[in-house]
Image (tube, rainbow, N blue to C red):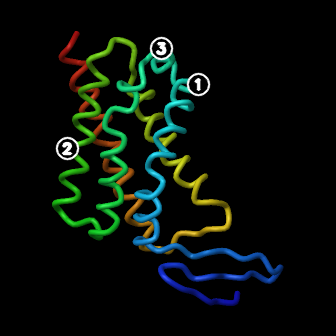
Amino acid sequence: MVFGGHSGRMTLVDSHGHSYFLVNKEYLADFIDNHRGEIVASFLGLARAEIPAAHDKDTYFLKDHLPDVLQQTANYMRSDGETKARDKSIELARKHALERAETDDYTAQQIRKEYAIVHELIFDLLGENRVLDKRAVVLFSAVSELTIAVVTEEFMKATLHRD
């Protein structure tokens, strides 16, 4: 591998001459911020296509806290996972779970699918020629796993008490 780089990205070139950009946590946070509108717009179409409970939901309902969740994901990355950012991520996941639990047609699996769609969109937009450095992977995985665990737990509690 040959290395070179600038401003949050290092260029890697493999033995076949393919170039890859090694992306750090700051670059990923900025990327999420700068593509928030595109991520939300794409999410709306994919959620309606892939999540049965989302088919007939209006844009406001589906969009929900997504712009805030994306902003908080970027903040979590920038803060290196500090407590305040972690707590804000948990708060947003709880709110999202409770709003979804108020409907009769969402399941825990479908709410988890919403997060999976968002994560897939981020990496699709980031592109095939970009690779996250270790710290970016650790932080993105941590905030993803945290929010999915909280949203699932809160959703299950809310729907259990609803019935």
Query: In the image, 23: left or right of 139?
Result: right
Q: Quadrant of residue 45?
A: top right
Helix, strand or loop at disc 1?
A: helix
Name the residue furthest right. 16
| Residue under the point 32% across and 42% down | 149
Left or right: 91 as drawn, with respect to 50: left
Q: Which residue is mark 3?
A: 56
Mark 3 Cα shell of 10 Å, populated few (<14), some (14-19), many (≥20): few
Which residue appears at 49% of the width and 31% of the height?
A: 44
Res 157 → quadrant: top left
The answer to whether 158 is drawn above or below residue 84 in the figure is above
Residue kind at label 2, given as amino acid type:
Glu
Please determine whether, in this image, residue 80 is positioned above or below residue 98: below
- Residue type at mark 3: give it: Asp
Q: Residue at x 34, y 55 (%)?
A: 73
| Residue 109, percent from left and from top | 44, 28
On residue 49, which mark appears? 1
Spot occupied by residue 153 in the image (x, y as percentages of width and height):
27, 34
Percent position of residue 19, x then y: 72, 77
Quick one: quadrant of the N terminus? bottom right
Horizontally, is 26 left or right of 1 in the view? left
Q: Residues within 10 Å of mark 1 (few under 14, many from 20)?
A: few
Label 3 sits on a secondary structure element that is loop
